[in-house]
Image: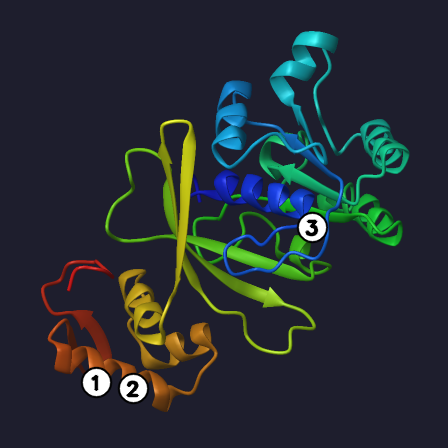
Amino acid sequence: MRGVGKTWLGIDLARGIAEGRSVGPWEGHGKKNVLYLDGEMPPDDVKSRDKGLGPPCENLVYINHEILFGRTGRIINITDPQVQSAITDLCLDLGFKVLFLDNLSTLASGSDENKGTDWEMLQPWLLNLRRRKIAVVFIHHAGRNPKEMRGHSKREDAAFWVIRLERTEEGEPRVGAKFISRFTKCRNAANEPTAYEWCYLPNGEQTQVTYRVMAAIDVFKQLVADGLTKCADIAAEMEVSKGYVSKLARQGERAGWLTIAGGTYKFRDQRKSAYND
């Protein structure tokens, strides 16, 4: 989804991995060398966001598309085997253990997002990086259905983790970002990861980062706001029983913000707002 906060979270995660610190509730596990390939943002915006999140980090290196083109006349196209080899060699030579690709739409020119066969231009390279113990984090837009990644579903097959960002329904902040993070794929996780609401709020040269746990009733309200109105659909999305969803619905009905009619859930005042009570 455009403008929801993907790059804010991406830069924060990259810095957290490079610094060996926690990012929100997610614990760090030692410093790692990180390479961040930016294919969309103006360089000044990347610089200001990075600076707002903390002092310069020696373990984090950015390659920005505008700066690269200005100095070399080259573009970053990760569907090009020569570019793939160059990035792999750079990671191996300089010891980068994590590679961020922000984002697939701008970095993978010439591939059709809707064709699974076109993903084969990237998947062998990504798997090669995995075999070399280089983790890849790629950032991508949501599709017309905001609950799914844009393009062919094949790109999720080999992924260990997929995080979906969703707008809150109280409106976008004038600066920064506010969104909800939810895991839609979490291979080898002992428990279902918690959903969180994040807020990145620039204040002068610093950016204040806050987060809070999304309680089950908050997740339920957000899903109704997103257009899910049936118990079974919400239960499948939350990965809970339909009986549990019915309890949440009755809780909303008692609180006065939800109506239940014919098995359909709607906000009582018809406002699609998850945070207006």
* Left or right: residue 165 compared with residue 119: left
Residue 250 numbered tag: 1
**Residue 35 falls in which quadrant of the image?**
top right
Q: What residue is pinned by disc 3?
A: 116
Q: Are marks 2 and 1 in contact (CB under 8 Å)?
A: yes
- How many numbered dots are placed on residues in this image? 3
x then y, percent, for residue 139: 59, 43
Q: Is residue 122 above or below residue 155?
A: above
Q: Which-is-in-front pick, marks 2 and 3?
A: 2
SS for tag 2?
helix
x then y, percent, for residue 19: 66, 44
How far apart are the alpha carbons under marks 2 and 3? 38 Å
Which amino acid does the dot numbered 1 rest on?
Arg
Residue 143 numbered tag: none
User: In the depicted view, which residue is nearer to us: 168 or 264?
Assistant: 168
* Left or right: residue 117 compared with residue 148: right
Q: Earlier in the sequence, mark 2 or mark 3?
A: 3
| Residue shown at the point (70%, 19%) measured from the top left | 75
Q: Is residue 171 above or below residue 217?
A: above
Q: Mark 2 Cα within 10 Å, few/some/many (few <14, many 20+)?
A: some
Which amino acid does the dot numbered 3 rest on?
Gly
Q: Are marks 2 and 3 in contact (CB under 8 Å)?
A: no
User: In the depicted view, which residue is nearer to us: 269 or 181?
Assistant: 181
Q: What residue is pinned by disc 2?
A: 246
* Left or right: residue 72 compared with residue 277: right
Q: Are marks 3 and 1 in contact (CB under 8 Å)?
A: no
| Residue shown at the point (23%, 77%) measured from the top left | 264
Q: Is residue 276 above or below residue 67?
A: below
How far apart are the alpha carbons under marks 2 and 1? 6 Å
**Residue 265 falls in which quadrant of the image?**
bottom left
The C terminus appears in which quarter of the rendering?
bottom left
